[in-house]
Image (tube, grey):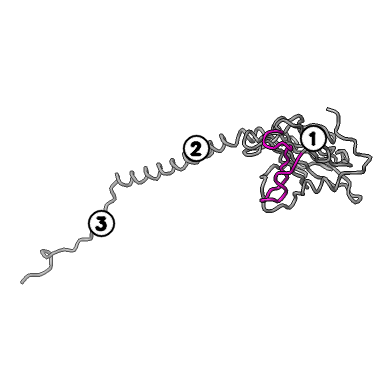
């Protein structure tokens, strides 16, 4: 008679022993994964610094008026009593509008000399009114050199502010902080660094800070029809004294 006593089969509990080598390997894998993530983040930061560092330093160098103007700064602006067109004659003759405001989401007017193509390359660009230069620098991809002038003007007894924006210019003849007079040459017509036929991308804006932004946008709040604004602010006939002497 067989029994299951001392000499019978025994059910022994089985325990799983952790291999020390496997545990060490798992820790090493976690460490390598953490090092890989840190290395990726470091490379990403270095890449961002390489890409945007020079531009940020350049903007700090050229845009000393990027901050909001103080009430004293705004009060010191000359009052513009008349606005003229920026190329051709002060009346807009000898130039044509190749792409108008809001056409294909355009935020300004593309003004050309009447010869077309590059016939107006190097032609003078004039300040449309008295004011102060707030930006004169390379504007980034697609822009070439950009100049922004801030103007103060009276309207219905209220002192208002507007910017004139001159894009794709070739040579800049003014610097940030400089006061300019209506009809003063501030630049020459350019090609945006060789990207386009020569023309002036011209905007009028209800901004105070020298924001560059894009030349095309669906939302046009803050932008004005440049030609319509100038036509509406030509001033009295006795103020029509022509361009300033070079």
Q: Which stretch appears magenta? A: 95-119
- Residue most extreme to the front: 115
Q: Which mark is first along the chain, 2 or 3?
A: 3
Identify the disc placed on residue 61.
Answer: none
Q: Could you tell me residue 102's position as x and y percent?
A: 71, 51
Q: Which mark is first along the chain, 3 or 1?
A: 3
Q: Secondary structure at mark 1?
A: strand
Q: Visible in this render: residue 137?
A: no
The residue singled out by tag 1 in the image is 126
Circle nearer the viewer, 2 or 1: 1
Q: Could you tell me residue 224's position as x and y percent?
A: 77, 49
Q: Could you tell me residue 176's position as x and y percent?
A: 76, 33
Q: Residues within 10 Å of mark 1 (few under 14, many from 20)?
A: many
- Residue most extreme to the left: 1
Which is more toward the observer, 105 or 60?
A: 105
Q: Which mark is first along the chain, 1 or 2?
A: 2
**At 80% across and 39% down in the image, what residue appears?**
93
Residue 118 falls inside the magenta stretch: yes
């Amino acid at each position: 008679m067989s029994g299951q006593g001392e000499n019978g089969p025994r059910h022994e509990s089985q325990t799983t022993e952790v291999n020390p080598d496997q545990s060490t390997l798992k820790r090493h894998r976690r460490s390598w994964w953490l090092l890989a993530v840190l290395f990726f983040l470091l490379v990403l930061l270095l890449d961002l610094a390489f890409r945007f560092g020079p531009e940020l330093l350049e903007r700090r160098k050229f845009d000393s008026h990027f901050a909001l103007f103080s009430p004293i700064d705004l009060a010191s602006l000359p009052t513009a009593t008349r606005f003229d067109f920026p190329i051709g004659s002060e009346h807009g003759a000898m130039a044509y509008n190749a792409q108008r405001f809001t056409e294909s989401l355009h935020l300004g007017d593309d003004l050309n000399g009447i010869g077309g193509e590059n016939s107006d390359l190097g032609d003078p660009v004039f300040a449309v009114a008295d004011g102060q230069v707030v930006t004169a620098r390379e504007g980034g991809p697609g822009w070439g050199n950009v100049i922004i002038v801030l103007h103060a003007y009276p309207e219905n007894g209220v002192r208002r502010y507007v910017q004139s924006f001159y894009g794709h210019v070739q040579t800049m003849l003014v610097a940030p902080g400089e006061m300019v007079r209506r009809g003063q040459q501030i630049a020459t017509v350019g090609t945006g660094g060789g990207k386009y036929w020569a023309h002036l991308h011209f905007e009028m804006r209800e901004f105070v800070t020298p924001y560059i932004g894009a030349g095309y946008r669906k939302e046009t709040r803050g932008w004005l029809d440049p030609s319509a604004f100038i036509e509406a602010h030509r001033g009295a006939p006795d103020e029509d004294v022509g361009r300033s002497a070079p």
